[in-house]
Amino acid sequence: MFEGEFTLEIHSNLKEILDGRNISIRQVARDIDYRFATVRQMYNDEIKHYPKDLISKLCEYLEVEISDILKLK
């Protein structure tokens, strides 16, 4: 059993991916048919829970793996 302190957290890497490809949050939300506010929260790494359907749509749309979108830091 682990008795130490957990220091790693999951963070969104969506901003880096979209900025690197010059794709807007609004364009992604429209293209994957997802709420702009939720995509924006993920872009800004402010989302508390990562909806599985959003992660799946983003991976397919951006042609990336989950590990490219979500990072442990």
Image (cartoon, rainbow, N blue to C red):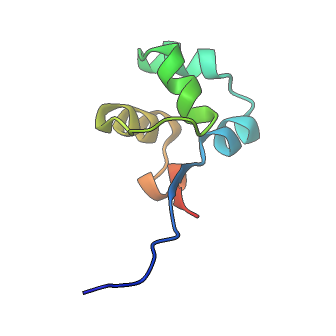
Residue 8 position within the rendered picture, expressed as x and y whole percent measured from the top left? 51, 67
Q: Nearer the viewer, residue 49 or 13?
A: 49
Q: Residue furthest left?
A: 1
Residue 27 position within the rendered picture, expressed as x and y whole percent measured from the top left? 60, 16
Which residue is depicted at the point 34% across and 35% down? 51
Left or right for 50, reference 41: left
Residue 21 position within the rendered picture, expressed as x and y whole percent measured from the top left? 71, 37
Can you say which quadrant of the picture contains the C terminus?
A: bottom right
Which residue is depicted at the point 35% across and 85% down? 3
Quarter of the rendering containing residue 28: top right
Quarter of the rendering containing residue 17: top right
Can you say which quadrant of the picture contains the N terminus?
A: bottom left
Residue 48 position within the rendered picture, expressed as x and y whole percent measured from the top left? 44, 38
Q: How many numbered marks are there?
A: 0
Q: Is residue 33 above or below residue 39?
A: above
Q: Nearer the viewer, residue 25 or 2?
A: 2
Which residue is depicted at the point 62% across and 22% down? 25
Q: Is residue 69 above or below residue 28?
A: below
Q: Is residue 72 above or below residue 58?
A: below
Left or right for 43, reference 35: right
Quarter of the rendering containing residue 15: top right
Which residue is depicted at the point 55% across and 28% down? 41
